[in-house]
Image (cartoon, rainbow, N blue to C red):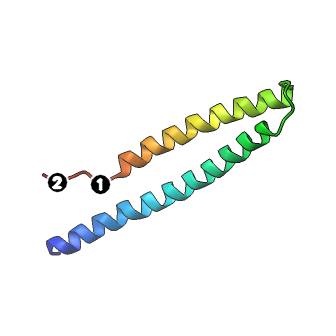
Amino acid sequence: MNHISQFSAQYKEYAEKMDVALLSLQEDFKTLYARIKELQESPDTVTPADQKLLDDIISNSKLVAERLSALDDLTPPRSS
């Protein structure tokens, strides 16, 4: 295999993993924004349902941050 073929094979592996990770992140953001919007449309007092939304938003935000970090880990290393 020549160098270009090797590069292509390695890049394809990374690209496929990044595509899956990005699609997952898009869904995470959609869910997060929907929950934030739902919370914003709630009356002024915080109900138990609102508290659950707040907890879900924090939990989802943490998940998004972890997935972004994992996506960064998938990025092919720079060659010097």
Q: Secondary structure at mark 1?
A: loop
Q: Residue 76, labelled with which disc? A: 1
Whole-percent x and y of residue 55?
A: 71, 29
The number of numbered badges drawn on the structure is: 2
Q: Is residue 33 left or right of residue 19?
A: right
Label 2: how many Cα within 10 Å (few below 14, some 14–19, many 20+): few
Q: Secondary structure at mark 2?
A: loop
Q: Residue 8, labelled with which disc? A: none
Rendered residue at 43%/64% (across/down): 16
Q: Up-down: is 67 above or below 42?
A: below
Rendered residue at 35%/67% (across/down): 12
Q: Nearer the viewer, residue 46 or 63?
A: 46
Rendered residue at 15%/71% (across/down): 3
Residue 4, image quadrant: bottom left
Whole-percent x and y of residue 41?
A: 82, 40
Whole-percent x and y of residue 63?
A: 57, 39
Q: Which image quarter holds the N terminus?
A: bottom left
Q: Up-down: is 11 above or below 68?
A: below
Whole-percent x and y of residue 67?
A: 50, 44
In the current view of this chain or complex, which residue is farthest to the left? 80
Q: Up-down: is 47 above or below 38?
A: above
Whole-Å distance between the Cαs marked 2 and 1? 9 Å
Q: Amino acid at mark 2?
A: Ser
Q: Which residue is mark 2?
A: 79
Q: Pointer 2 and pointer 1: residues touching (CB < 8 Å)?
A: no
